[in-house]
Image (cartoon, rainbow, N blue to C red):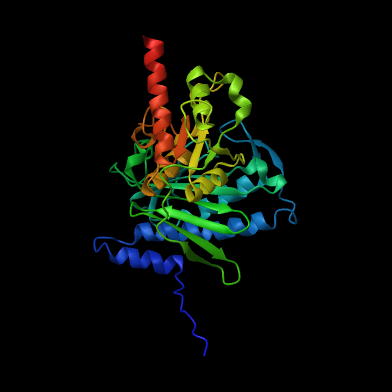
Amino acid sequence: MVQHTATSVVTIERFIIEQERLHPEATGELSGILYDMGLAAKMIANKVRRAGLADILGATEHSNVQGEIQQKLDIFANDTIVKAMDHGGRLCAMASEEEPGIIPIPDNFRTGKYCLMFDPLDGSSNIDVNVPVGTIFSVMQKITRGRHGELEDLLQPGRRQVAAGYVIYGSSTMLVYTTGQGVHGFTLDPSIGEFLLSHPNIRIPDEGRYLSVNDSYEGLWDEGTKQLMRKYRGLEGGRRPLSVRYVGSLVADFHRNLLGGGIFCYPANRKAPGGKLRLLYEANPLAFICEQAGGAACDGVTRVLDIQPTELHQRVPLYIGSRRDVDLATQTFQHHSELVGA
């Protein structure tokens, strides 16, 4: 007689409820935010999957606050998240990479004690060539006293995040999030429309296999950055060389390295001395996830989660991934700085 091994099927809703029970003081508001993000992710995944058939590929005639041409799906994803999140009574404000200022909660809706910051569709320039894209989000608790969120609520260091996550729209759609109690991944089963727990308690290896960096900027890097890349490639310092894997979609590169081990680098360069990636919408949430999975993230000198934001669309250099690989970055830059200053 054949014996069948029973496998527990855990939906994201069931998982969140079970996690909430571990914290009797929880009000359920944060859980509601995660539910709503899951709903928005399903809607965006559906559009991404049908993009080639629905005439929503390509750019519009408008630019976002970063001066970049907005993709049609960028706008759809941005609007979908705003509409999914603004009426639940859990948020006091939102901010998006696609919009210049605070997105207020309409006066006819209740407000809550949390702020949401998000990149609605990271890597959207790759949509036309069918490269995975993603959504990144960060949740902060309100610190001001008024009904609506203020700039001060959004400009908090990343270490104060209460939740962060990303969705990757690839061969399958996955939602990965943390509330400071480890990192968990859920894969969307399109046949039933549910996110199912597929990757519980994700842990990134201490030392990685992959290096994700855009080498085309090498001519613009300073000597410290060039030296670091030589070390990662095993050309200096006696290290085992990392294999170069670079998609050009932050969520896709980060997701691979989170599961397999590695480091994603977007160094400062002469044309972008302050870095390119956005602190609030990209670096902070991914750094929170990475640290909760046992990894690390820095700007080359400072831990990302300790950086004090000064503006909504602040940019930073980013080194994120396996802890030993990130530690090598800080050690290399510190040593190079000491040599330059000597």
Q: Which sits in the foreground, 58 or 188? A: 188
Q: Is residue 155 left or right of residue 66?
A: left
Above-or-below relation of 333 to 17: above
Residue extending farthest front: 238
Above-or-below relation of 148 to 171: above
Q: Is residue 27 left or right of residue 138?
A: left
Look at 38% across and 22% down and name the residue there. 334
Q: Quadrant of residue 189?
A: bottom right
Image coordinates of residue 123 in percent, x first then y, are 60, 42
Q: Is residue 123 left or right of residue 148?
A: right
Image coordinates of residue 199 in percent, x first then y, are 46, 60
Image coordinates of residue 231 in percent, x first then y, are 49, 28
Q: Quadrant of residue 324?
A: top left
Look at 66% across and 36% down and name the residue there. 62
Can residue 97 be seen? Answer: yes
Above-or-below relation of 271 to 243: above
Q: Which sits in the foreground, 192 or 258? A: 258
Q: Which sits in the foreground, 238 or 129? A: 238
Image coordinates of residue 219 in percent, x first then y, are 60, 19
